[in-house]
Image (spheres, rainbow, N blue to C red):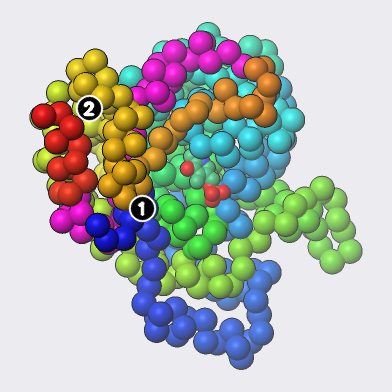
Amino acid sequence: MGNKILVTKSSMPSLDEYVNEIKDIWDTHWLTNMGEKHVRLQEELVKYLEVGHVELLTNGHMALELTMQAMNLHGEVITTPFTFASTTHAIVRNKLEPVFCDINEDDYTIDVSKIESLITDRTSAILPVHVYGNICNIEEIERIAKKYGLKVIYDAAHGFGERYKGKGIGNFGDVSCFSFHATKVFNTIEGGAVCFKDMDFGRELYRLKNFGIRDTETVDGIGANAKMNEFCAAMGLCNLKHIDGEILKRKKVVECYRERLCGIDGIRLNTVQKDVEPNYAYFPILIDEKVFGFSRNEVFEKLEGNNIGARKYFYPLTNTFDCFHGKYDANLTPVAMHISKRVLTLPLYAELSLEDVNRICDIIVSMKM
Ligand SMILES: *Cc1c(COP(=O)(O)O)cnc(C)c1O
């Protein structure tokens, strides 16, 4: 049966390439604190993402958390529950109140027609997620934010390298937060970044990622420590050289999946969005038990039994997490609940062979017969 196919496998440069990149660290002994690699990766990302400014951080979660702190938000933040724990936790850890908006049935991003009814005089921001790399309704979010004077923070953890109408995805909203975690399309082992335009915000974010230190004798912010170290930045510099090729390999995997699974009754594939240059970050399928004959959980178990690791991503919804002790009512986000019970993300990474993709599809297709 061979080795287990995991849901993802991190992209890595060759060992030689990485060793070559980190060699001079043994001359400089500069391991962290905005060293040469940190500076260089930041510059290269500004170019690659085609954005104004990039601030590197230890991870995508701190990107979200420190962004909200740097903006000095208050009151309520409108977001969605169909996301990774990090999005909601970053809000709550800032002592802000998440207000959950439902998602679209087709692309799983925030349902913009439901945002305005959730706005109160306590609302200070909207935090939408480009789920699976599906891009939110950017124009409508911008219109609403302008009308009510709200900040927009995109959780772009799934959106690395994507373009919308020819523009880098990090250009939209006030800021976009990326994750460079090992499991993401582009990784720095652990890492994250914030893309922004406003330099005052940038200076505040920089200060907060470095303990709130303004200069050697002034500490006027209650900051955290979220500096990316040189080894992570070096991994990023290496991985960035190969990113276009990696995305192209992912595309081939996705095309193979789509071809094999497109006509199967009871299985719905991810929407292909107009005006979006995708990064093929995830391959979610939606399983309608009544039509397909088996539930999402049964398909998950079947794959598991064949040594294939799919993932119930995102299940459970963040507004049902135990840590919130029933504080939020998931019945208020019925579409998110519906999707969350039926969605399954299949293995997808650059090195996944088409042979393995076909084997995974054979198993799913055979269930139907
Ligand atoms: C991965 C992820 C994060 C958090 O990023 P880390 O780098 O793991 O801290 C936040 N939001 C979403 C949607 C994610 O998938």
Q: Answer with left or right where residue 111 lies relative to residue 55.
A: left
Mark 1: secondary structure: loop
**Quadrant in which residue 352 is drawn:** bottom left
Q: Nearer the viewer, residue 225 or 298?
A: 298
Q: Nearer the viewer, residue 368 or 12?
A: 368
Which quadrant holds the C terminus? top left
Q: Nearer the viewer, residue 339 or 73?
A: 339
Q: Nearer the viewer, residue 256 or 107?
A: 256
Task: Mark 1 vs mark 2: give the one in front.
Answer: 1
Near mark 2 (Cα within 10 A), the count class, few <14, some 14-19 or many ≥20, is: some
Distance from label 1 to label 2 (Cα)? 22 Å
Can see residue 161?
no
**Which residue is at 31% across, 60% downward?**
3
Q: Which residues are magenta?
A: 328-357
Q: What's the residue type where badge 2 is placed?
A: Arg
Which of pointers 1 and 2 lies earlier in the amino acid sequence?
1
